[in-house]
Structure formats: structure tokens, C-alpha cells
């Protein structure tokens, strides 16, 4: 067995590409070697800004011989067919074998391929990998044809075993493989030879290169924390930035600097974002004041002055960046204190979607919907409407224009500066949340109302224009929006009929109010862009519209001059989506996302389906409460047994109803009972029904399930002692009606027919 070491040494690889490049290098090389007949024990990939490295241990020294048999044409086949078979195999006629079968003799080609040395295979696989490497972006340099992310300088390819090491020879566009590499660009630039991976790693460390990115991350974080602790401060954790910075340096040297006093009044998010985005600095917080007062930069070299010159240069650039941020902040405060009217007016010219109008149109819809939602979540309707109208105002601010990731957060600061209620400020900050499965769910009632309105408007809007997710494509993040609604509803225990909310949202989009609307035609939709109306050709004189019944977007009228306007009377049915049906389709989409969400919570798919089949399945809080209770019930000892009894009763009853052509749903009477077990079941059903009915009314599903569990023993005893299909038709009918009571009582909790097992 041998060990293989590969290093591809180049100019700096962008940090964002390194992790994927490590995985691709490992995958392409190992798959190529295995496909060629080699085996290996383990493999590990590494990267620094200037090198991609792969180490493979326990690699076989050669591939195994291969013997292939290929069946050819009949020995009596036309010469052309036989010649074609010979060409495909590379054999001569005397090398073919003749074998007898039912139809005579058939020609066979037996090709034996000897094993090949690992070095030959490695050279082929590595060259193919380099030439076809899937960089997101690549370049050519000089006069060669090779493409790489940055100019490739050298290839180290070393195969070693107990007897020593050999260079695997290959030459790609004039780059000859060798056993040498280079250290740190400034601290140890000389090239040096290596004999194995262990030797390579040790010599790189001496040459001021930390090969493992995880080790560099740990060194950066530990060094940053030590510097901050010594100054009585603490580093603001940012794992994404840590990974990125580790991809920028080979020999990390953390340095700490201070932010000038003139900038400390900026919001901490502004300082943090500006330093991270522009200079890849970590923020350092003073725990006593809660302010961001310092920064950590990571140099890629050691200096005689211990980084003093580097820090001075960084602080000079930082001051320029923060001066811009301070200018944006001060100008934004002027607009905010004036009521943000300038920004709100500007949103009229910001298109949300060419079929869904401007941001101002969308805000008007969200505000109306937030007002409707407010009472359902315990918020004041006026405050919720006000918050919705102002939540997106910061989209026109200079600060958000520079740092879009601060939208919402800056809105909170501007709302406070404008003297607005704290609930309005929090809604501006939180109405985008939750953005992902781990994001915090807002809990302030006004924030919940605005966040729900925002996401529901997004979903109904794109459903209205038929821009639904397809397969893995979801360009408008509608799956995320649906999950956001689900988490907002469940996280706050909101009791709401989702179909009613969707209907109100559709009404805002398609405008079914009793008022007359002025619709402007100027060659493209300009007002009420999302409204779908009935296609209305005009009379020859251009006066009265005639209804044709075909849905069409505004701006697509026939025969109407551009720039003209037309009024529709309130009774004209221009406001409805074709077929309306969007609520049901969108509710099904919510249910699909809820299934995924609940499966992650450990609730089985059949349990979810059993609850979805029940009335009120658009009340997500009720639906999940029911599913959780049913899932817990089925995990008890009584659950599966009770389910088996129900299914037996349902099967016998369904077969009898199909055979007799009638429904046995009325008239079960205890006076016709012939056995103690039968009478006991009547009594048990009476008791269970008396307990289950009020429990369901109060939505106490756990109590309903507990009452249902008490039916297990009476049902088991009944089926053991009683023959349902009695020869006496009266007794048979009575027992079938009794089974109907079992089905009706149990099905009131969930549709148990959908439960597996």
C-alpha cells in the first residue's frame, strides 16, 4: 500500500470557493482512482489561500487485471457485421471464440486487460481533474489553454511507501509535477522538497503556513478573544466571517484596534456591518456600555513592529468607511424626524414586481391586512396599520441603500427617532422574521400582525399571477414565506382560519371593494397592477366597455388609446381572479410545508394526513394540537390496539354497506343486545361519547384521546364474543349500527382510516 500527496499551488483562491474546491478535489480524484481499479483506506482534503491539497492513505499499488467477455454476432452473420464487431473490440478474426448455442455458433470476444501501476492511473486522473475542475469562475493566463481559478504555479504529486517516495510524472501546459512546494509568500518564500504528507505538514508549519483551515479558525478566534479580554472587551461572534477570514490568511496574526470616538454614536449594527463587509473585521464590544468600540483584524504576516503599521493603515481606511456611514446616518435621521414622508413617497417609484405593483401598492395592501389580523393576535388595529405603513420606509434610506442587509433593523432606529410607539419600531425590525428555520419568531402582537400580513400578501400575490414554486425552483422564496407564516402562527398560538386571511389578502390584491376604481392604460399596467379583470373591448367610439368574460391583466385592453382612463361601476366583476380557487390551492401549499415542519418535529406523515382530513384544517394551531395529541396517543400501549379495533369495525361495516347498498348509521339499540360483551360496548360508547364531545368542543384533544382509549377493552371483548353478521337480520342491523357508533365516535377525533398499520 502507498500514500498519495497532491498539492495544486496557485495565486490566491477566493475564500468563498475554498470549501467547495476541497470537496470537489477529493471527490474527483478518489472517484477517478476507484473507477480505474484502485482502492484506498482514507482521504483528506485541505486548503489555504494559495493551495489545494489532497492526502490519500492506503492506496493500492496497481489495479487488478480485468477479463471481459463480449457476445458478438452469429458465426454465419454477414461479413460486414463481423467486421464491425472486430473493430469495436480491437481483435482479429483468429482471436474470437466460437461457442455453440441453440441457433448454431456465436462469436465471442474475450479481452484481458492487465493491471496498471498506480502512478500511471494517478497521472491520468489528476490531469483530467485539473482540466475539468468545476470552479465557479476560472481564467486563462499566458499562451496556454489551461483554465484555473487563478494562475497555477506548480503541481506536487508524490507517491510514497516504506521503500521511499517517487514523483508521479505529469506535465500540464508546461507545469511539470515535482516533490517541492513553497511556504508563506513573505515569511518563507523559498521552495523545499517533501517526502510524505507528515513531512509536508511539518515543513509547511515551519514555513509559516497553517494547512488545516479548522486550525486557522481556532487560532484566529483564540487570538482575538485573548486580545479583547486583555482590554476588558469581548469579541462579537460571527462564524461566517471567521470561516471567510481563515480562507484569506496562511499564517493568521490577530491585531486589535480602537474605533474613533466620533463614530461610537452609530448603531452597533452599522459599525458591525461596515467593518465586516468592507474590511473583514471582527467587532469588539464593551460589555459595560454595550457599544461596539473596537475591532479585530487578522494579518497574514508577522512584522517587526508587531502590527502597528498594519493597524494604522487599517484604522485610516476604517475611518473613511465609517465617515460615509455617519453621513448616511445623519441624513437619514433628518428624513426620519420629518416623519419619513420623503421615503414613503419615493416607494411609489420602486417596483415590487411588474405584475404586483410598486412597493407603495404593496404596503397599502399589507397595512389593510395587518389591520384585519391585529384583533386575532391581540394587537391594536390602528397601531398595526401604522406599523405596516412605515415598516418598509427604510428601503429608501441611504443606509439601507449601502447595506441592504440592514433593512428592518434601520427602520427600528428611524421609527424611534421619529418618536413613534415602540411597537411600531419593533414591527419594522421584526416584520421580515422569521427568515429561516432557526430564526427567532417575533412575539410582540403588532410585529406578529405585520409579519403575517407581509408574508401572506407575498404568497397570495405570487399565487395570483401564477408564479408558484416548481420543483426545486423558488425564486421568490415562497416556501420560506409559508414556513414563516406557520412558525408565526404556531409560535404565538394564534387561532385563525387561514382561508379567511387568504381570502382577505386576495380581496386586497384583486380589489373587490364596492368603490369605483380609476384604471389607467398607458401601454403597461400602472395602477392596481396585480388586479385581474375581465377583458373589456371598447365600442368603436371608445365609450362604454362590454364584458367578454376573459380574464386579463390591466393594461391589456383592446382598442383603448394609451394614457386614457376608464371607470368601472362597482357591480362589474372585474375584481375576481379567474375561477377564484386560489385560497384552496394556497392552503394545500401551506399543508405541504406544515408536513415538512411537523416531520422535523417527529410526527409521522400518516398522523398529519389523519388530522388534515378533519374540518378546520386551516386553523394551523388547532391542527398541530390535534396531531400532537394523536401522535402521543399512538405511542401508548392502548393506541395501536384501539386503532386495530377501529379498523376492524370500519372494515366490517364498509363491506356490509357496500354489499347491502345502504348506510348503517342510525338505530343501534341496547335492547337488542344478546351478550354481556355487547351490552358492555353500548355502555362504554355512551360513556366515551359523553366525555369526547365536550373535550372536542374545548379542543382538549388529549382528554378526547384518553376517553377513546377506554374503548379498547370493550371493543376487543365484543369482537371476541360476538358475530356481527348474525343470521337474525334485526340483530345484524343493530350490530352494524353499533359499529357505526364506533366509527363515528373515533372519527370525530381524527380520520383514523389514514393511519398506517
Image: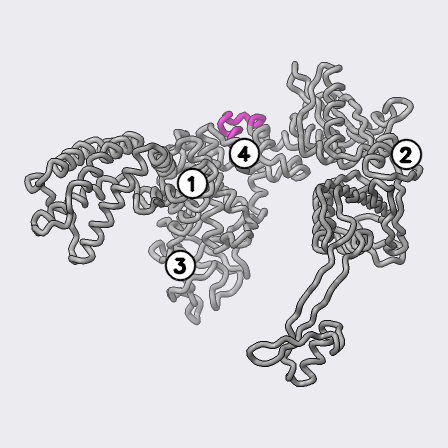
Residue nearest the viewer, comparing 459 with 398: 459
**Taking the image as drawn, is residue 753 in sight?**
yes
Task: Give the distance between the C-alpha atoms of the residues marked 4 and 2, in whole angstroms.
Answer: 42 Å
Task: Give the distance between the C-alpha atoms of the residues marked 1 and 2, in whole angstroms.
Answer: 61 Å
Residue picked out by circle 1: 369
Residue 153 is situated, as x and y percent measured from the top left of the image, at 87, 47
Q: Looking at the image, is 223 positioned above or below residue 150?
A: above
Q: Looking at the image, is 218 positioned above or below residue 529?
A: above
Q: Nearer the viewer, mark 1 or mark 2?
A: 2
Q: Looking at the image, is 727 positioned above or below residue 114?
A: above
Residue 438 bears which disc, if any?
Answer: 4
Q: Residue at x 47, y 47 (%)?
A: 459
- Classify mark 3: helix, strand or loop: loop
The magenta-colored residue range is: 416-427
- Badge 1 crowding class, 10 Å Cα cut-off, few under 14, some 14 to 19, many 20 or more, is many
Going from the N terminus, do you reach mark 4 or mark 2 first? 2
Q: Main secondary structure of the magenta part?
A: helix
Residue picked out by circle 2: 186
Task: Give the distance between the C-alpha atoms of the residues marked 4 and 3, in whole angstroms.
Answer: 38 Å
- Classify mark 2: helix, strand or loop: loop
Going from the N terminus, do you reach mark 1 or mark 3 first? 1
Q: Nearer the viewer, mark 4 or mark 3?
A: 4
Task: Give the distance between the C-alpha atoms of the residues marked 3 and 2, in whole angstroms.
Answer: 69 Å
Going from the N terminus, do you reach mark 1 or mark 4 first? 1
Residue 220 is situated, as x and y percent measured from the top left of the image, at 75, 27
Residue picked out by circle 3: 578
Q: Residue at x 93, y 37 (%)?
A: 190
Amino acid at each position: 500500500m502507498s500514500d498519495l500527496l497532491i498539492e495544486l499551488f496557485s495565486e490566491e483562491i477566493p475564500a468563498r470557493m475554498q470549501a467547495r474546491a476541497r470537496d470537489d478535489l477529493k471527490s474527483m480524484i478518489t472517484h477517478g482512482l476507484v473507477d480505474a481499479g484502485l482502492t484506498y483506506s482514507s482521504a483528506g482534503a485541505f486548503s489555504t489561500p494559495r493551495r489545494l491539497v489532497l492526502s490519500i492513505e492506503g492506496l493500492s499499488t496497481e489495479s487488478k487485471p480485468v477479463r471481459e467477455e463480449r457476445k458478438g454476432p452469429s458465426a454465419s452473420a454477414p461479413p460486414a457485421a463481423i467486421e464491425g464487431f472486430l473493430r469495436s473490440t480491437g481483435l482479429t478474426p483468429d482471436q474470437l471464440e466460437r461457442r455453440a448455442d441453440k441457433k448454431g455458433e456465436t462469436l465471442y470476444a474475450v479481452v484481458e486487460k492487465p493491471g496498471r501501476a498506480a502512478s500511471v492511473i494517478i497521472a491520468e486522473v489528476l490531469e483530467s481533474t485539473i482540466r475539468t475542475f468545476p470552479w465557479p469562475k476560472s481564467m486563462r493566463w499566458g499562451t496556454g489553454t489551461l483554465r484555473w481559478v487563478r494562475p497555477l504555479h506548480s503541481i506536487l504529486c508524490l507517491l510514497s511507501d516504506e521503500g521511499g517516495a517517487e514523483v508521479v510524472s505529469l506535465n500540464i501546459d508546461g507545469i511539470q509535477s515535482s516533490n517541492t512546494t513553497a511556504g508563506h509568500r513573505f515569511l518563507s518564500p523559498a521552495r523545499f522538497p517533501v517526502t510524505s504528507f507528515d513531512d509536508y505538514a511539518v515543513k509547511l508549519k515551519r514555513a509559516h503556513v497553517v494547512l488545516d483551515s479548522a486550525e486557522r479558525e481556532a487560532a484566529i478566534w483564540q487570538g482575538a478573544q485573548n486580545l479583547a479580554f486583555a482590554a476588558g472587551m469581548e469579541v462579537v461572534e460571527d462564524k461566517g466571517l471567521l470561516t471567510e477570514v481563515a480562507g484569506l490568511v496562511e499564517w493568521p496574526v490577530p491585531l486589535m484596534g480602537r474605533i474613533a470616538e466620533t463614530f461610537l454614536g452609530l448603531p452597533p449594527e452599522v459599525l458591525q456591518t461596515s467593518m465586516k463587509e468592507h474590511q473583514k473585521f471582527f467587532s469588539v464590544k464593551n460589555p459595560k456600555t454595550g457599544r461596539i468600540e473596537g475591532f479585530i483584524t487578522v494579518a497574514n504576516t508577522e512584522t517587526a513592529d508587531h502590527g502597528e503599521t498594519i493597524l494604522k493603515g487599517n484604522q485610516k481606511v476604517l475611518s473613511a468607511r465609517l465617515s460615509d456611514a455617519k453621513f448616511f446616518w445623519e441624513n437619514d435621521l433628518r428624513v426620519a424626524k420629518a416623519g419619513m414622508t420623503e421615503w414613503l413617497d419615493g416607494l411609489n417609484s420602486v417596483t415590487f414586481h411588474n405584475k404586483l405593483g410598486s412597493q407603495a401598492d404593496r404596503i397599502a395592501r399589507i397595512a389593510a391586512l395587518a389591520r384585519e389580523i391585529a384583533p386575532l393576535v391581540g394587537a391594536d388595529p390602528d397601531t398595526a396599520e401604522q406599523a405596516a405603513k412605515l415598516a418598509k420606509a427604510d428601503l429608501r434610506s441611504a443606509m439601507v441603500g449601502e447595506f441592504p442587509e440592514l433593512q428592518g433593523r434601520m427602520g427600528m432606529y428611524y421609527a424611534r427617532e421619529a418618536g413613534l410607539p415602540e411597537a411600531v419600531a419593533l414591527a419594522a425590525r421584526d416584520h421580515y422574521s422569521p427568515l429561516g428555520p432557526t430564526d427567532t419568531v417575533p412575539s410582540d402582537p403588532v410585529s406578529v400582525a405585520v409579519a403575517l400580513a407581509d408574508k401572506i400578501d407575498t404568497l397570495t400575490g405570487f399565487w395570483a399571477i401564477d408564479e408558484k414554486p416548481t420543483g426545486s425552483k423558488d425564486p421568490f422564496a415562497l416556501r420560506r414565506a409559508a414556513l414563516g407564516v406557520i412558525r408565526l402562527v404556531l409560535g404565538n398560538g394564534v387561532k385563525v382560519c387561514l382561508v379567511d386571511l387568504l381570502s382577505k389578502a386576495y380581496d386586497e390584491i384583486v380589489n373587490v371593494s364596492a368603490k369605483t376604481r380609476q384604471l389607467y392604460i398607458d401601454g403597461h399596467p400602472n395602477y392596481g397592477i396585480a388586479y385581474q379583470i375581465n377583458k373589456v373591448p371598447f365600442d368603436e367610439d371608445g365609450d362604454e366597455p362590454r364584458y367578454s368574460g376573459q380574464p386579463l391583466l390591466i393594461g391589456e385592453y383592446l382598442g383603448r388609446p394609451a394614457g386614457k382612463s376608464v371607470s368601472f361601476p362597482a357591480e362589474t366583476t372585474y375584481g375576481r381572479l379567474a375561477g377564484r380557487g386560489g385560497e384552496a390551492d394556497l392552503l394545500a401549499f401551506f399543508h405541504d410545508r406544515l408536513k415538512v415542519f411537523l416531520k422535523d418535529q417527529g410526527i409521522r406523515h400518516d398522523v398529519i394526513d389523519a388530522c388534515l382530513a378533519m374540518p378546520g384544517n386551516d386553523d394551523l394551531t388547532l391542527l398541530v394540537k390535534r396531531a400532537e395529541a394523536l401522535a402521543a396517543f399512538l405511542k401508548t400501549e392502548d393506541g395501536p390496539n384501539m386503532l386495530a379495533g377501529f379498523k376492524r369495525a370500519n372494515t366490517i361495516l364498509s363491506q356490509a354497506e357496500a354489499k347491502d347498498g345502504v348506510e348503517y348509521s342510525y338505530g343501534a339499540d341496547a335492547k337488542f343486545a344478546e351478550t354481556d360483551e355487547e351490552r358492555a360496548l353500548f355502555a362504554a360508547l355512551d360513556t366515551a361519547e359523553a366525555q369526547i364531545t365536550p373535550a372536542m368542543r374545548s379542543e382538549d384533544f388529549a382528554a378526547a384521546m384518553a376517553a377513546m382509549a377506554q374503548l379498547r377493552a370493550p371493543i376487543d371483548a365484543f369482537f371476541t364474543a360476538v358475530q356481527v353478521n348474525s343470521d337474525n337480520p334485526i340483530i345484524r342491523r343493530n350490530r352494524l349500527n353499533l359499529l357505526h357508533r364506533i366509527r363515528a365516535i373515533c372519527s370525530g377525533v381524527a380520520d383514523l382510516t389514514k393511519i398506517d398499520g
